[in-house]
Protein backbone atom coordinates (compact mmCIF):
# COMPACT_ATOMS: atom_id res chain seq x y z
CA UNK A 1 0.00 0.00 0.00
CA UNK A 2 1.77 3.09 -1.28
CA UNK A 3 0.41 6.47 -0.30
CA UNK A 4 0.03 8.87 -3.20
CA UNK A 5 2.04 12.06 -3.61
CA UNK A 6 -0.66 14.40 -2.34
CA UNK A 7 -2.99 13.36 0.45
CA UNK A 8 -5.35 15.30 2.65
CA UNK A 9 -6.40 14.35 6.14
CA UNK A 10 -10.01 15.13 6.84
CA UNK A 11 -11.15 14.76 10.38
CA UNK A 12 -14.84 14.58 10.97
CA UNK A 13 -15.85 14.50 14.59
CA UNK A 14 -19.48 13.59 14.10
CA UNK A 15 -19.09 11.47 10.98
CA UNK A 16 -21.63 13.31 8.83
CA UNK A 17 -19.42 15.26 6.41
CA UNK A 18 -17.61 12.48 4.57
CA UNK A 19 -19.37 13.21 1.29
CA UNK A 20 -18.95 16.98 1.55
CA UNK A 21 -15.25 16.47 2.25
CA UNK A 22 -14.78 14.04 -0.61
CA UNK A 23 -16.56 16.50 -2.89
CA UNK A 24 -13.60 18.85 -2.39
CA UNK A 25 -11.17 16.19 -3.71
CA UNK A 26 -13.48 15.55 -6.68
CA UNK A 27 -13.53 19.24 -7.50
CA UNK A 28 -9.74 19.37 -7.15
CA UNK A 29 -9.58 16.59 -9.75
CA UNK A 30 -11.50 18.83 -12.15
CA UNK A 31 -8.71 21.36 -11.56
CA UNK A 32 -6.21 18.61 -12.54
CA UNK A 33 -4.79 17.91 -9.10
CA UNK A 34 -4.98 14.42 -7.67
CA UNK A 35 -5.39 14.36 -3.91
CA UNK A 36 -6.40 11.27 -1.98
CA UNK A 37 -8.56 11.60 1.12
CA UNK A 38 -7.55 10.19 4.47
CA UNK A 39 -10.21 10.17 7.15
CA UNK A 40 -8.42 10.68 10.43
CA UNK A 41 -9.75 10.53 13.96
CA UNK A 42 -7.64 10.40 17.07
CA UNK A 43 -8.20 8.29 20.12
CA UNK A 44 -8.84 11.51 22.06
CA UNK A 45 -11.62 12.52 19.65
CA UNK A 46 -13.18 9.05 19.77
CA UNK A 47 -13.16 9.18 23.56
CA UNK A 48 -14.77 12.62 23.72
CA UNK A 49 -17.43 12.01 21.06
CA UNK A 50 -17.90 8.39 22.18
CA UNK A 51 -17.40 6.82 18.75
CA UNK A 52 -15.58 3.75 17.46
CA UNK A 53 -12.98 3.47 14.67
CA UNK A 54 -15.35 1.29 12.65
CA UNK A 55 -17.71 4.25 12.31
CA UNK A 56 -15.00 6.23 10.52
CA UNK A 57 -14.45 3.29 8.17
CA UNK A 58 -18.16 3.12 7.51
CA UNK A 59 -18.38 6.83 6.81
CA UNK A 60 -15.42 6.69 4.40
CA UNK A 61 -16.79 3.65 2.55
CA UNK A 62 -20.21 5.24 2.21
CA UNK A 63 -18.86 8.57 0.96
CA UNK A 64 -16.65 6.83 -1.59
CA UNK A 65 -19.51 4.65 -2.80
CA UNK A 66 -22.09 7.37 -3.07
CA UNK A 67 -19.81 9.75 -4.98
CA UNK A 68 -18.25 7.00 -7.14
CA UNK A 69 -14.76 7.91 -6.02
CA UNK A 70 -12.50 5.65 -8.06
CA UNK A 71 -9.20 6.48 -6.39
CA UNK A 72 -7.55 5.33 -3.20
CA UNK A 73 -8.69 6.45 0.22
CA UNK A 74 -7.55 5.69 3.73
CA UNK A 75 -8.74 5.60 7.32
CA UNK A 76 -6.14 6.92 9.75
CA UNK A 77 -5.74 5.76 13.33
CA UNK A 78 -4.50 9.19 14.30
CA UNK A 79 -2.15 9.69 17.23
CA UNK A 80 -2.34 6.17 18.55
CA UNK A 81 0.08 4.38 20.87
CA UNK A 82 0.65 0.87 22.20
CA UNK A 83 -2.13 1.21 24.75
CA UNK A 84 -4.91 1.84 22.24
CA UNK A 85 -3.72 0.69 18.81
CA UNK A 86 -5.53 -2.66 18.99
CA UNK A 87 -8.94 -1.00 18.78
CA UNK A 88 -7.97 0.57 15.45
CA UNK A 89 -6.36 -2.37 13.72
CA UNK A 90 -9.40 -3.75 11.98
CA UNK A 91 -10.92 -0.51 10.69
CA UNK A 92 -7.81 1.42 9.72
CA UNK A 93 -5.17 1.17 7.01
CA UNK A 94 -3.17 4.23 7.98
CA UNK A 95 -1.51 4.42 11.40
CA UNK A 96 -0.09 7.56 12.96
CA UNK A 97 2.28 6.33 15.62
CA UNK A 98 2.47 9.02 18.28
CA UNK A 99 5.65 8.74 20.30
CA UNK A 100 5.90 12.32 21.54
CA UNK A 101 5.64 11.20 25.17
CA UNK A 102 8.89 9.26 24.78
CA UNK A 103 10.92 12.21 23.51
CA UNK A 104 13.60 13.22 25.99
CA UNK A 105 13.66 9.85 27.74
CA UNK A 106 16.90 8.00 27.25
CA UNK A 107 17.30 4.72 25.44
CA UNK A 108 19.87 2.16 26.60
CA UNK A 109 23.43 3.47 26.45
CA UNK A 110 24.59 0.65 24.17
CA UNK A 111 21.78 1.44 21.71
CA UNK A 112 22.71 5.10 21.70
CA UNK A 113 26.40 4.31 21.08
CA UNK A 114 25.49 2.04 18.22
CA UNK A 115 23.33 4.78 16.70
CA UNK A 116 26.03 7.43 17.10
CA UNK A 117 28.62 5.13 15.53
CA UNK A 118 26.37 4.46 12.53
CA UNK A 119 26.02 8.20 11.94
CA UNK A 120 29.64 9.27 12.35
CA UNK A 121 30.07 9.30 8.57
CA UNK A 122 27.83 12.40 8.45
CA UNK A 123 29.98 14.53 10.75
CA UNK A 124 31.78 17.53 9.33
CA UNK A 125 30.01 19.68 6.80
CA UNK A 126 27.17 17.86 5.15
CA UNK A 127 26.08 18.86 1.71
CA UNK A 128 22.34 18.60 1.20
CA UNK A 129 21.14 18.97 -2.40
CA UNK A 130 18.58 21.76 -2.58
CA UNK A 131 20.05 23.73 0.30
CA UNK A 132 22.49 26.51 -0.55
CA UNK A 133 24.60 26.10 2.59
CA UNK A 134 26.18 23.03 4.15
CA UNK A 135 24.96 21.69 7.47
CA UNK A 136 27.67 21.42 10.08
CA UNK A 137 27.35 18.28 12.17
CA UNK A 138 29.48 17.06 15.06
CA UNK A 139 29.49 14.02 17.30
CA UNK A 140 28.04 15.85 20.32
CA UNK A 141 25.04 16.84 18.24
CA UNK A 142 24.43 13.27 17.13
CA UNK A 143 24.76 12.07 20.73
CA UNK A 144 22.25 14.69 21.90
CA UNK A 145 19.81 13.64 19.19
CA UNK A 146 20.29 10.00 20.15
CA UNK A 147 19.61 10.78 23.80
CA UNK A 148 16.53 12.76 23.00
CA UNK A 149 14.84 10.72 20.26
CA UNK A 150 16.11 7.14 20.10
CA UNK A 151 13.74 5.77 22.73
CA UNK A 152 10.80 7.42 20.98
CA UNK A 153 11.72 5.81 17.67
CA UNK A 154 12.17 2.44 19.38
CA UNK A 155 8.67 2.86 20.77
CA UNK A 156 7.39 3.64 17.26
CA UNK A 157 9.01 0.35 16.23
CA UNK A 158 7.07 -1.50 18.90
CA UNK A 159 3.76 0.01 17.78
CA UNK A 160 4.61 -0.60 14.12
CA UNK A 161 5.38 -4.28 14.75
CA UNK A 162 2.12 -4.68 16.66
CA UNK A 163 0.18 -3.41 13.65
CA UNK A 164 2.33 -5.40 11.24
CA UNK A 165 1.70 -8.65 13.08
CA UNK A 166 -2.07 -8.06 12.86
CA UNK A 167 -2.37 -6.70 9.32
CA UNK A 168 0.72 -8.00 7.53
CA UNK A 169 3.59 -5.93 6.18
CA UNK A 170 2.71 -3.69 3.25
CA UNK A 171 -1.00 -3.66 3.96
CA UNK A 172 -1.11 -0.28 5.66
CA UNK A 173 0.52 3.14 5.63
CA UNK A 174 2.74 4.13 8.54
CA UNK A 175 3.24 7.65 9.83
CA UNK A 176 5.50 8.58 12.72
CA UNK A 177 4.37 11.70 14.59
CA UNK A 178 6.39 13.81 16.98
CA UNK A 179 4.37 17.00 16.75
CA UNK A 180 2.61 16.98 20.10
CA UNK A 181 5.63 17.99 22.12
CA UNK A 182 7.09 21.25 23.44
CA UNK A 183 10.13 21.77 21.25
CA UNK A 184 10.25 21.72 17.46
CA UNK A 185 12.61 19.40 15.60
CA UNK A 186 15.02 21.19 13.29
CA UNK A 187 16.10 19.77 9.90
CA UNK A 188 19.30 18.21 11.28
CA UNK A 189 17.31 16.42 13.98
CA UNK A 190 14.81 15.28 11.37
CA UNK A 191 17.61 13.76 9.29
CA UNK A 192 18.91 11.67 12.17
CA UNK A 193 15.42 10.75 13.35
CA UNK A 194 14.88 9.32 9.86
CA UNK A 195 18.14 7.38 10.23
CA UNK A 196 16.74 5.86 13.42
CA UNK A 197 13.39 5.07 11.80
CA UNK A 198 15.15 3.23 8.99
CA UNK A 199 17.37 1.31 11.41
CA UNK A 200 14.30 0.35 13.44
CA UNK A 201 12.79 -1.13 10.28
CA UNK A 202 9.74 1.15 10.19
CA UNK A 203 8.62 1.72 6.59
CA UNK A 204 7.37 5.25 7.36
CA UNK A 205 5.70 6.89 4.39
CA UNK A 206 4.97 10.10 6.27
CA UNK A 207 6.75 11.87 9.11
CA UNK A 208 5.10 14.56 11.22
CA UNK A 209 7.67 16.68 12.99
CA UNK A 210 6.83 19.63 15.17
CA UNK A 211 7.58 22.71 13.11
CA UNK A 212 8.82 26.01 14.40
CA UNK A 213 6.10 28.47 15.50
CA UNK A 214 2.71 27.95 17.07
CA UNK A 215 0.06 25.76 15.45
CA UNK A 216 -2.95 26.72 17.53
CA UNK A 217 -6.18 24.90 16.85
CA UNK A 218 -8.43 26.33 14.18
CA UNK A 219 -6.60 29.63 13.78
CA UNK A 220 -3.69 30.92 11.72
CA UNK A 221 0.00 30.26 12.21
CA UNK A 222 1.75 32.32 14.87
CA UNK A 223 5.45 32.81 14.24
CA UNK A 224 8.03 33.96 11.73
CA UNK A 225 6.72 32.91 8.31
CA UNK A 226 10.10 33.36 6.59
CA UNK A 227 11.86 31.23 9.16
CA UNK A 228 9.19 28.56 8.82
CA UNK A 229 9.59 28.64 5.03
CA UNK A 230 13.36 28.20 5.29
CA UNK A 231 13.11 25.26 7.68
CA UNK A 232 10.32 23.66 5.68
CA UNK A 233 12.50 23.68 2.56
CA UNK A 234 15.39 22.24 4.54
CA UNK A 235 13.10 19.51 5.84
CA UNK A 236 12.16 18.57 2.28
CA UNK A 237 15.81 18.50 1.24
CA UNK A 238 16.77 16.43 4.26
CA UNK A 239 14.02 13.90 3.53
CA UNK A 240 15.40 13.43 0.01
CA UNK A 241 18.87 12.92 1.41
CA UNK A 242 17.54 10.44 3.97
CA UNK A 243 15.80 8.44 1.24
CA UNK A 244 19.10 8.21 -0.64
CA UNK A 245 21.10 7.19 2.41
CA UNK A 246 18.79 5.02 4.47
CA UNK A 247 16.44 2.15 3.84
CA UNK A 248 13.21 4.17 3.69
CA UNK A 249 10.21 4.15 1.32
CA UNK A 250 10.87 6.23 -1.80
CA UNK A 251 7.58 8.07 -1.33
CA UNK A 252 8.39 9.25 2.20
CA UNK A 253 6.98 12.74 2.67
CA UNK A 254 6.18 15.32 5.30
CA UNK A 255 2.90 15.25 7.16
CA UNK A 256 1.78 18.64 8.40
CA UNK A 257 -0.48 18.36 11.41
CA UNK A 258 -1.90 21.75 10.77
CA UNK A 259 -4.31 22.14 13.66
CA UNK A 260 -6.34 23.48 10.72
CA UNK A 261 -6.19 26.77 8.89
CA UNK A 262 -2.54 27.81 8.80
CA UNK A 263 -3.34 30.16 5.94
CA UNK A 264 -0.29 32.42 6.21
CA UNK A 265 2.18 29.56 5.65
CA UNK A 266 0.22 27.77 2.90
CA UNK A 267 1.79 29.82 0.05
CA UNK A 268 5.26 29.01 1.41
CA UNK A 269 4.42 25.33 1.60
CA UNK A 270 3.17 25.46 -1.98
CA UNK A 271 6.36 27.13 -3.23
CA UNK A 272 8.52 24.60 -1.43
CA UNK A 273 6.57 21.63 -2.80
CA UNK A 274 7.00 22.99 -6.32
CA UNK A 275 10.69 23.70 -5.83
CA UNK A 276 11.43 20.16 -4.62
CA UNK A 277 8.68 18.40 -6.59
CA UNK A 278 7.76 16.97 -3.20
CA UNK A 279 4.63 15.27 -1.94
CA UNK A 280 2.71 16.27 1.17
CA UNK A 281 0.17 14.99 3.61
CA UNK A 282 -1.83 17.77 5.21
CA UNK A 283 -3.85 16.82 8.24
CA UNK A 284 -6.84 18.81 9.41
CA UNK A 285 -9.61 17.93 11.82
CA UNK A 286 -11.39 20.73 13.65
CA UNK A 287 -11.91 22.92 10.62
CA UNK A 288 -14.79 20.72 9.44
CA UNK A 289 -16.53 20.79 12.80
CA UNK A 290 -16.32 24.60 12.78
CA UNK A 291 -17.89 24.64 9.30
CA UNK A 292 -20.75 22.58 10.68
CA UNK A 293 -21.34 25.32 13.22
CA UNK A 294 -21.12 28.03 10.56
CA UNK A 295 -23.66 26.14 8.46
CA UNK A 296 -26.00 25.80 11.44
CA UNK A 297 -25.61 29.49 12.26
CA UNK A 298 -26.41 30.46 8.67
CA UNK A 299 -29.41 28.13 8.62
CA UNK A 300 -30.99 30.25 11.38
CA UNK A 301 -33.90 29.01 13.47
CA UNK A 302 -33.10 26.03 15.65
CA UNK A 303 -29.73 25.66 13.87
CA UNK A 304 -28.65 29.07 15.12
CA UNK A 305 -30.10 28.31 18.55
CA UNK A 306 -27.94 25.19 18.87
CA UNK A 307 -24.80 27.17 18.09
CA UNK A 308 -25.69 29.71 20.78
CA UNK A 309 -26.48 26.95 23.23
CA UNK A 310 -23.10 25.30 22.60
CA UNK A 311 -21.37 28.64 23.10
CA UNK A 312 -23.11 29.34 26.40
CA UNK A 313 -22.14 25.92 27.77
CA UNK A 314 -18.59 26.15 26.48
CA UNK A 315 -18.22 29.58 28.04
CA UNK A 316 -19.28 28.29 31.44
CA UNK A 317 -17.10 25.17 31.14
CA UNK A 318 -14.04 26.99 29.84
CA UNK A 319 -11.37 25.28 31.98
CA UNK A 320 -12.72 21.78 31.52
CA UNK A 321 -12.90 22.07 27.72
CA UNK A 322 -9.64 23.94 27.22
CA UNK A 323 -7.64 21.71 29.58
CA UNK A 324 -6.85 18.86 27.15
CA UNK A 325 -5.85 21.42 24.50
CA UNK A 326 -3.96 23.84 26.77
CA UNK A 327 -0.73 23.69 24.76
CA UNK A 328 -2.38 24.33 21.40
CA UNK A 329 -4.80 27.17 22.06
CA UNK A 330 -4.28 30.79 23.08
CA UNK A 331 -7.57 32.28 24.19
CA UNK A 332 -7.77 35.72 25.78
CA UNK A 333 -10.87 35.33 27.93
CA UNK A 334 -11.45 39.06 28.01
CA UNK A 335 -11.97 38.95 24.24
CA UNK A 336 -14.81 36.44 24.47
CA UNK A 337 -18.31 37.88 24.10
CA UNK A 338 -20.69 36.95 26.90
CA UNK A 339 -23.30 34.30 26.14
CA UNK A 340 -25.95 36.99 26.76
CA UNK A 341 -24.51 39.08 23.96
CA UNK A 342 -24.16 36.09 21.62
CA UNK A 343 -27.77 35.13 22.30
CA UNK A 344 -28.80 38.41 20.59
CA UNK A 345 -26.71 37.76 17.48
CA UNK A 346 -28.10 37.26 13.98
CA UNK A 347 -27.01 34.41 11.71
CA UNK A 348 -24.57 36.75 9.98
CA UNK A 349 -23.03 37.95 13.23
CA UNK A 350 -22.62 34.42 14.52
CA UNK A 351 -21.21 32.99 11.27
CA UNK A 352 -19.02 36.09 10.84
CA UNK A 353 -17.48 35.74 14.30
CA UNK A 354 -16.78 32.06 13.67
CA UNK A 355 -15.65 32.01 10.07
CA UNK A 356 -11.90 32.16 9.63
CA UNK A 357 -11.79 35.31 7.55
CA UNK A 358 -9.20 37.61 9.06
CA UNK A 359 -10.31 40.56 6.94
CA UNK A 360 -13.85 40.40 8.33
CA UNK A 361 -14.50 42.81 11.22
CA UNK A 362 -16.82 40.28 12.87
CA UNK A 363 -14.16 37.52 13.07
CA UNK A 364 -13.09 36.64 16.63
CA UNK A 365 -10.20 34.20 16.92
CA UNK A 366 -10.76 33.72 20.65
CA UNK A 367 -14.34 32.67 20.13
CA UNK A 368 -13.28 30.42 17.26
CA UNK A 369 -10.73 28.60 19.43
CA UNK A 370 -13.25 28.13 22.20
CA UNK A 371 -15.72 26.65 19.73
CA UNK A 372 -12.92 24.45 18.40
CA UNK A 373 -12.60 22.66 21.73
CA UNK A 374 -16.35 22.70 22.44
CA UNK A 375 -17.27 19.65 20.36
CA UNK A 376 -17.68 17.75 23.61
CA UNK A 377 -20.74 19.93 24.31
CA UNK A 378 -22.20 19.10 20.89
CA UNK A 379 -21.52 15.41 21.54
CA UNK A 380 -23.50 15.66 24.77
CA UNK A 381 -26.45 17.12 22.87
CA UNK A 382 -26.62 13.76 21.10
CA UNK A 383 -29.55 13.50 18.69
CA UNK A 384 -30.39 17.17 18.99
CA UNK A 385 -27.06 17.98 17.38
CA UNK A 386 -27.01 15.08 14.92
CA UNK A 387 -30.62 15.80 13.92
CA UNK A 388 -29.66 19.40 13.13
CA UNK A 389 -26.76 18.15 10.99
CA UNK A 390 -29.25 16.10 8.98
CA UNK A 391 -31.87 18.84 8.79
CA UNK A 392 -29.41 21.45 7.55
CA UNK A 393 -27.19 19.14 5.55
CA UNK A 394 -27.28 21.22 2.36
CA UNK A 395 -26.04 24.50 3.83
CA UNK A 396 -23.46 22.73 6.01
CA UNK A 397 -22.12 20.62 3.14
CA UNK A 398 -21.60 23.68 0.98
CA UNK A 399 -19.50 25.30 3.71
CA UNK A 400 -17.52 22.13 4.42
CA UNK A 401 -16.65 21.56 0.74
CA UNK A 402 -15.78 25.17 0.00
CA UNK A 403 -13.63 25.48 3.08
CA UNK A 404 -11.50 22.46 2.20
CA UNK A 405 -11.29 23.22 -1.49
CA UNK A 406 -10.85 26.97 -1.56
CA UNK A 407 -9.02 27.70 1.64
CA UNK A 408 -6.85 24.60 2.01
CA UNK A 409 -6.43 22.57 -1.20
CA UNK A 410 -6.12 25.53 -3.59
CA UNK A 411 -3.42 27.51 -1.78
CA UNK A 412 -1.36 24.44 -0.90
CA UNK A 413 -1.65 22.10 -3.85
CA UNK A 414 -2.73 24.34 -6.73
CA UNK A 415 -1.33 27.78 -5.86
ZN1 LIG B 1 -0.77 15.89 15.45
Image: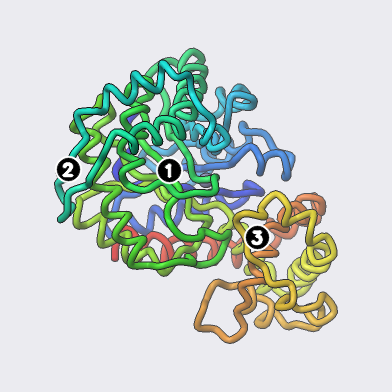
Q: Nearer the viewer, mark 1 or mark 3?
A: 1
300 vs 381: above or below: below
Spot the residue most to the front: 140
**Residues at marks 1 and 3 touching, judged by CB atoms closer than 8 Å:** no
* 397 vs 236, nearest the viewer: 236
Question: According to the image, label 3 marks what residue?
Answer: 372
As helix, strand or loop, the secondary structure at mark 2 comes to strand
- Which mark is drawn over residue 154? none
As helix, strand or loop, the secondary structure at mark 1 comes to strand
Question: According to the image, label 2 marks what residue?
Answer: 125
Q: CA distance from mark 1 to mark 3?
A: 22 Å
How far across and how far down the image is residue 106, in percent? 51, 27
Q: Look at the image and tell me in which quarter the C terminus lies.
A: bottom left
For marks 1 and 3 on the same chain, the one whose residue lies earlier in the sequence: 1
Label 1 C-beta lies within 8 Å of the nearest ligand 1 atom = yes
Q: Residue at x 43, y 28 (%)?
A: 150
Spot the residue most to the top: 165
Q: Residue at x 45, y 33 (%)?
A: 149
* 394 vs 337, nearest the viewer: 337
Question: According to the image, label 1 marks what residue?
Answer: 208
Amino acid sequence: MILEKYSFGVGDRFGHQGKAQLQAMLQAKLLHVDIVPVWNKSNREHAIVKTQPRQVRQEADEAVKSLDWAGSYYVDADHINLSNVDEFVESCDFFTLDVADFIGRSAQATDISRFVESCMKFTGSLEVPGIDHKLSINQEQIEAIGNKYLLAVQEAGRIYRRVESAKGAGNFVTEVSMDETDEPQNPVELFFILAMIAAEGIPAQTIAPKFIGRFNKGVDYVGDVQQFAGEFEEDLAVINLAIQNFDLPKNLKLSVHSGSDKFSIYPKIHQALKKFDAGLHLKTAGTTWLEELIGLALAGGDGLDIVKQIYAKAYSRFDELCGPYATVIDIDKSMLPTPELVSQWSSEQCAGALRHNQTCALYNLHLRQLFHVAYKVAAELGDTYLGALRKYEAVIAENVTNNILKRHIKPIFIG
